Image (spheres, grey):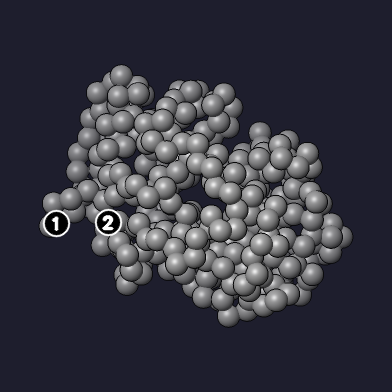
């Protein structure tokens, strides 16, 4: 089975945990494609990595030679706030992903799993004014819906904010290229620096997000891989969440409590292209297809698992 699974971005944050979980459950290594621009070299032991960009035309040959029939696409630029500053960068990433998908259609790939995002929503509807990151996620979804078929089945997973690290502190989020809320808060508290909290001064409210531990996400990912025959429709979409939202001030206070250090912070107006609330229930229930067992349901419990990791890297 391992030789038939390819994970793009397999050395990235979610990819590393997914490859690790897949190896643990199947005793085989998935094939990974990662150019290591933002990947973690430590994670190479969990998969058979091919150092390459997904836009490389040789990918078709690799898929054919390795007899891959399922692709889990995690390779992507992944930050809403970064996309607001680097619009062209994210556009180029979008074009590369479309090229990659078109190339896959020329192979024997039967299943394509795409990591999308809840950031396309504002409360219970699609957000009209999207960031480049969210806009391109939605555009890829629409493209996949158009090309999905009995011979190219698509599963879309709209992820929440994914946080956490391994309990032993050996594997976690290691991306110094972008600013994410949890790594930033840990770093600033450890180094006694000020934290920037985004806030809507007009509505007088903090943005809220749904958070899930990366190990729970990896477990869901691998269970989907193992149960793809349960997905009878050509095109399947699921919103992944644990039904509870927390504001950025909630997250900061929780980390401050864990670290037993007071957190400094100041407020900044949130960009209108960022959602204030991303919760949206799926029309289809993923639990009908796989057994979902979320281990980390409490925010503080999730964040505690980060302590050892961030103290090590910061």
Upstream in sequence: badge 1 or badge 2: 1
> Height in image: 303 above or below 152?
above
Task: Classify residue 260 by image quadrant.
Answer: top left
Residue 208 location in percent, x, y? Answer: 29, 49
Q: Residue at x 50, y 41 (%)?
A: 294
Which label sits on residue 72? Answer: none
> Height in image: 189 above or below 121?
above
Which residue occupies the foreground of this view, 175 or 205? 205
Residue topped by disc 2:
276
Residue 224 location in percent, x, y? Answer: 63, 54
Which residue occupies the foreground of this view, 218 or 50? 218
Q: Residue at x 30, y 61 (%)?
A: 123
> Height in image: 120 above or below 249?
below
Q: Dot 2: what SS?
A: loop
Residue 305 location in percent, x, y? Answer: 47, 28
Residue 75 visible in the shown view:
no
Task: Classify residue 303 by image quadrant.
Answer: top left
Q: Residue at x 62, y 72 (%)?
A: 233
Label 1 to label 2: alpha-carbon separation: 10 Å
Left-right relation of 102 to 192? right
Residue 129 visible in the shown view:
yes
Left-right relation of 94 to 29? left
Mark 1 nearby-residue class (10 Å; few <14, some 14–19, many ≥20): few
Residue topped by disc 1:
203
Residue 269 location in percent, x, y? Answer: 20, 52
Q: Residue at x 27, y 56 (%)?
A: 276
> Height in image: 101 above or below 189?
below
């Amino acid at each position: 089975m391992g030789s038939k699974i390819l994970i793009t971005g397999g050395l990235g944050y979610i990819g590393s945990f997914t490859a690790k979980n897949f190896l643990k459950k199947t005793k085989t290594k998935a094939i990974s494609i990662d150019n290591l621009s933002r990947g973690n070299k430590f994670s190479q032991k969990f998969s058979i990595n091919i150092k390459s960009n997904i836009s490389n035309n040789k990918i078709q040959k690799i898929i054919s030679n390795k007899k891959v029939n399922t692709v889990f696409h995690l390779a992507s630029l992944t930050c809403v706030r970064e996309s607001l500053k680097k619009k062209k960068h994210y556009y180029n990433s979008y074009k590369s992903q479309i090229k990659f998908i078109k190339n896959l259609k020329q192979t024997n790939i039967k299943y394509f799993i795409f990591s999308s995002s809840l950031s396309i929503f504002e409360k219970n509807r699609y957000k009209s004014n999207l960031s480049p990151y969210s806009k391109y996620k939605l555009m890829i979804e629409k493209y996949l819906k158009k090309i999905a078929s009995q011979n190219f089945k698509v599963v879309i997973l709209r992820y929440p904010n994914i946080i956490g690290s391994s309990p032993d502190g050996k594997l976690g989020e290691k991306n110094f290229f972008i600013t994410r809320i949890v790594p930033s808060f840990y770093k600033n508290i450890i180094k006694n620096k000020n934290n920037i909290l985004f806030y809507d001064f007009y509505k007088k409210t903090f943005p809220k997000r749904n958070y899930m531990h990366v190990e729970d996400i990896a477990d869901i990912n691998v269970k989907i891989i193992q149960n793809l025959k349960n997905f009878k429709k050509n095109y399947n979409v699921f919103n992944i969440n644990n039904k509870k939202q927390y504001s950025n001030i909630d997250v900061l206070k929780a980390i401050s409590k864990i670290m037993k250090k007071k957190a400094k912070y100041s407020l900044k107006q949130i960009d209108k292209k960022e959602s204030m609330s991303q919760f949206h229930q799926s029309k289809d229930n993923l639990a009908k297809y796989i057994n979902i067992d979320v281990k980390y349901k409490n925010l503080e419990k999730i964040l505690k698992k980060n302590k050892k990791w961030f103290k090590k890297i910061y």
